[in-house]
Image (cartoon, coloured by chain):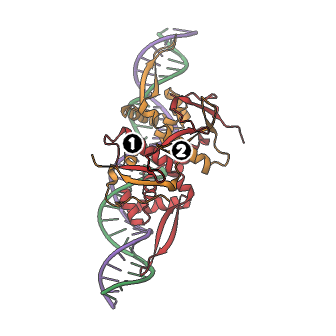
Chain colours: A red, B orange, C purple, D green
Amino acid sequence: MTGALDPRDAWAADRCSIAAALEVVGTRSAFLILREAFFGTTRFDDLASRAGISEPVAATRLRELVDEGLLEREDYREPGQRTRQRYRLTEKGADLLPALVALMQWGDRWLDETGGPVELRHTGCGERVSVQLLCDADHRVSTDDLDLALRAEA
Amino acid sequence: MTGALDPRDAWAADRCSIAAALEVVGTRSAFLILREAFFGTTRFDDLASRAGISEPVAATRLRELVDEGLLEREDYREPGQRTRQRYRLTEKGADLLPALVALMQWGDRWLDETGGPVELRHTGCGERVSVQLLCDADHRVSTDDLDLALRAEA
DNA sequence: AGCCTGACTAAGTTCTACACAAGTCAGCTA
DNA sequence: TAGCTGACTTGTGTAGAACTTAGTCAGGCT
């Protein structure tokens, strides 16, 4: 489908950023919590129940995601309420959105005959939003028009 | 970061395409095998060793990915050799590329101070390729300019 | 003073993902 | 015919990712 990487065995799999990213968000629960965070959920109980995971798992995962810097925990208080905690995406966390959307888009296309429950629209113009491969000259790039290369060593 | 989903608790998490996609490719080994498939690796031993996973896991994962229709197994024979098997991406599998690239891009940016080992370039024009959120009117969309909505029921 | 709610923690268990080591089997090559 | 290589399978063990059920603890509310 895509071109082969020239020096086939030459490069180490352990330096790969995909593997590194999976170390951080490699679990189902991490993805699901991030999904909820994108959808605007901030409170512990809501995150756990809407992501459909148990509270102990949510607690562990949230701690890890905060440690990794994808979420931050902050105290807040509504008038007449006591102080509570809320989780929100950091820039690092928010930057994962394209990966989430790509997964959603794939699921919408290949796994859900109705096209999926959630739609993304551009606030500016109202058009549908999707994830695309784009080159710096703004061409949409298809899977077949990709070259892979090793970046120069540091 | 992004807008909240209007009917907050109204929609079922189990209908979500992200969760559905994770059922199919939710493991580290599945992602890593797909990565290798994109890089052009086709043979069993190469897939296992380059993905850095054990052969038993590779066998299981490959069987699942073939069953799910992301890869197809075909026999081939080189002259003077016996028949061997080779795995290649189907359209369904190839369509996951944006998700892989998004993950790679995130890892390159946030986890690897050198910017990551692999680079993607557009065959046509040679420019660097990345994953972007794009609306149907071809605007690049930032995380803040997204609206979420429920799609009309089927 | 006692209750309630939100945000967790603790204990015990099950399931899955993965590793390593070894064995199998087919079929070409020597 | 024996050996080798590629593509697996089997067997065994560990760690982690998940569940349920049950608790804790703080602090406002009645």
Can you give x and y, in whole percent of width and height, for residue A112 in the image?
A: 33, 42
Chain containing the residue with disc 2: B
Q: Pointer 2: what residue?
A: B132
Q: Is residue B84 visible?
A: yes
Q: Amino acid at mark 2?
A: Gln
Can you tell which mark lies on residue A15?
Answer: none
Q: Please name whichever residue, D9 or B145, is drawn nearer the observer in this view of the structure.
A: B145
Q: CA distance from mark 1 to mark 2?
A: 18 Å
Give the residue furthest to the right: A154
Place residue D11 in its image quadrant.
top left
Can you give x and y, in whole percent of width and height, for residue B69 in the image?
A: 38, 32
Q: Is residue B54 above or below residue C30?
A: below
Q: Is residue A68 visible?
A: no
Q: Is residue A17 above or below residue B85?
A: below
Can you give x and y, in whole percent of width and height, for residue B133 in the image?
A: 51, 46
Can you give x and y, in whole percent of width and height, for residue C10 in the image?
A: 42, 68
Q: Pointer 1: what residue?
A: A107
Q: Is residue B137 above or below residue A94?
A: above
Q: Please name whichever residue, D13 or B60, is drawn nearer the observer in this view of the structure.
A: B60
Q: Please name whichever residue, A15 or D8, is drawn nearer the observer in this view of the structure.
A: A15
Q: Residue at x 31, y 54 (%)?
A: B12
Q: Is residue B112 left or right of residue A108?
A: right
Q: Residue at x 51, y 42 (%)?
A: B138
Q: Callout 2: 10 Å neighbours few (<14), some, many (20+)? A: many
Q: Identify the secondary structure beneath mark 1.
A: helix
Place residue A135 in its image quadrant.
top right
Q: Is label 1 or label 2 in front?
A: 2
